[in-house]
Amino acid sequence: MDTHNRAAVITGGASGIGRALAETLVARGGRVVIADVDGAEAGRTAEAIGDAATAMVCDVRDVAAVERLAEESWDMLGGVDLVFANAGVGPGAPLLKGDPATFDFIYEVNMRGAWATCASFARLMMAERRIGHLCITGSEHSLGMQHAGAGFYSASKAAVLGLADVLRAEMPDHISVSLLCPGLTATRLYETGRNDDLPATPERATEFTKAMLARGMAPAHIAETALKGIEDGAFIIPTNAAPRPAVEKRAAEIMQGFDRYATDGAEAERYSVPHVMAEVREEMKRD
């Protein structure tokens, strides 16, 4: 898909990667809806970008709110071409020090929010047979890079890889899907959750995270890479090669597991889910 002159909706669009996507798309002649739980910041971002940007308040944890966002932005823009399920939070805490509230919060935003966003807009695209693209913001941790000390975040980003993979299998030909996998990026991720009733992040950890993120890639680079990947028809869009060794190690471990433990040949075919599904369908037809 050519990303010029497109109507787009971006969740988590008030800052960081979301804001950079909005700025880049508008620079390419597009119109954008900047959706964010922080309505004031979304408004400031839209005002800074100009008339081609509109701010809307949306908490992606609220499925009904996401559905309203889809309907209202669709009507306002006269249809939507590009959807960026970009809202995300993190990083959480070491797994053994985690708590249910933090687990739920991270998964509600990173996983349920991505699902609700893609599902709401995909239904509209399908109903009107509109060519469209859904881009979910994952992470280098979606691909096998461990994030020790932030297990809930890392696991949620691995989960959105599965979500995106199934989503592209279920979509009709006129709707494509990609997973953006940025590495360390200069955002304010350390501020996520500031409006929620969650335990305060220790100040030392906050300052450490701020210092780490300050050394990350510029969000503008991430946005340009995302749009290039969409135009190329890519499913996985990594932004730098830092996680490549971890990905190769994960792939090698998977293949080693198959070689050592998995059944092969006719036995493997017997238990292949597509094969079994085809057999069951055929049997049901005969019955």
Image: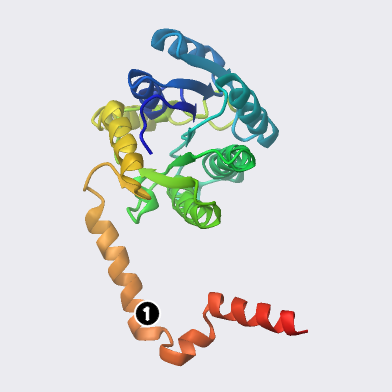
In this rendering, position of residue 58 left or right of residue 89: right
Residue drawn at 32 percent across, 31 percent down: 223
Question: Percent x, y for residue 220?
Answer: 29, 26
Residue drawn at 46 percent across, 40 percent down: 133
**Which residue is farthest right?**
287
In this rendering, position of residue 255 left or right of residue 128: left
Residue drawn at 54 percent across, 75 percent down: 274
Vertical placement of residue 237 versus 60, above or below: below
**Which residue is farthest bottom?**
266
Q: Nearer the viewer, residue 235 or 132?
A: 132
Q: Nearer the viewer, residue 248 or 135?
A: 135
Vertical placement of residue 254 versus 155, above or below: below
* Residue type marked 1: Phe
Question: Percent x, y for residue 28?
Answer: 33, 22
Question: Percent x, y for residue 235?
Answer: 38, 50
Vertical placement of residue 136 versus 266, above or below: above
Q: Which residue is mark 1?
A: 258
The N terminus appears in which quarter of the rendering? Answer: top left
In this rendering, position of residue 67 left or right of residue 255: right
